[in-house]
Amino acid sequence: MRKIEVVLPLRLFSNLDSSESTPLHSQLTQIIEAAILSGKLEPGDRLENEVTLGERLGLSRPTIRRAISELVNRGLLVRRRGVGTQVVQGQITRGLELTSLFEDLRTAGLTPKTRMLEVATVPATKMVAEKLGVQEGADVLYIHRLRFASGSPVAVMENWLNSEYAEPNRARLETLGLYSALKERGIEIKVAKQKIGARKSSALEAELLEIEKSAPVLTMDRTGYDTSGHAIEYGKHCYRTDIYSLEFTLVSR
């Protein structure tokens, strides 16, 4: 992922005209959008900051901010805390097949990477116990990971595994998806119940995903079962909405 700051040449803004009926912020939006669509600004490129851009163009900061906000709303730019305003990466889409995020990223031609945040044996909460079919307070394996796609953080992933089943190798979890790591141990997820939702990110999620505090995230809760119907794992994941989406086909009756 490129994180360089790209300064667009002044000639691209030569047609800005305050006498036009089109507001200046709309003219600026159109110019930056054209730069993105033409490839002058590439996915991951960081736009110069609002103050510098305004000074170069002789425009007020509110005008610059309004133009950029419009591009953020259109899904072309994203504001990332500690990084700045960047051109959005290509979206990762997931269908309704039973796949792992790791597999989805590879299919999309991206390079998946995992940062292990925590691996620990913990007592099952009431909710986790119900999902895994174990007694409340029983030992379960907790796995907390941050998944990257070609350098960009895309998902915060929490999983709880039934302790009756083999513990996946931690080192392999950094190079494989959970389902692949389990399969290496002879455990295969065949069926899953899944719920999709959306909410505001927590402070920790926003920090890990490098998004604004309380920015929206896509959520997925999933319980995976083996061929005998035994619950193997329960997962709660959240995804950045600017680079991840769900896609499926609907057929009328």
Image (cartoon, rainbow, N blue to C red):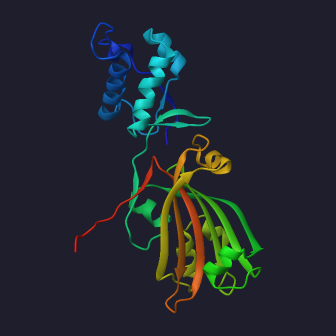
Q: How many marks?
A: 0
The image quadrant that residue 63 belongs to is top left
Q: Is residue 205 left or right of residue 228?
A: right
User: Residue at point 22% right, 70% down?
Assistant: 252
Q: Nearer the viewer, residue 144 or 11?
A: 144
Residue 35 drawn at (x, y percent): 34, 28
- Residue 95 seen in the figure: yes
Q: Is residue 119 left or right of residue 4?
A: right
Q: Residue furthest left?
A: 253
Above-or-below relation of 243 to 25? below
Vertical order, 113 against 136 (above or below):
above
Image location (x, y in percent) of residue 5: 51, 28
Give percent across and percent down for residue 7.
45, 22
Q: Quadrant of the C terminus?
A: bottom left
Kindly identify the residue that appears in the image at 47 percent across and 50 percent down.
241
Rendered residue at 62%/35% (across/down): 82
| Above or below for 44 versus 99 | above
Q: Residue furthest bottom?
A: 228
Residue 214 falls in image quadrant:
top right
The answer to whether residue 124 is left or right of residue 202 is: right
Does residue 152 appear anywhere in the picture? no
Residue closer to the observer: 21 or 57: 21
Q: Residue 46, percent across and down?
A: 49, 31
Residue beneath the point at 37% across and 65% down: 95
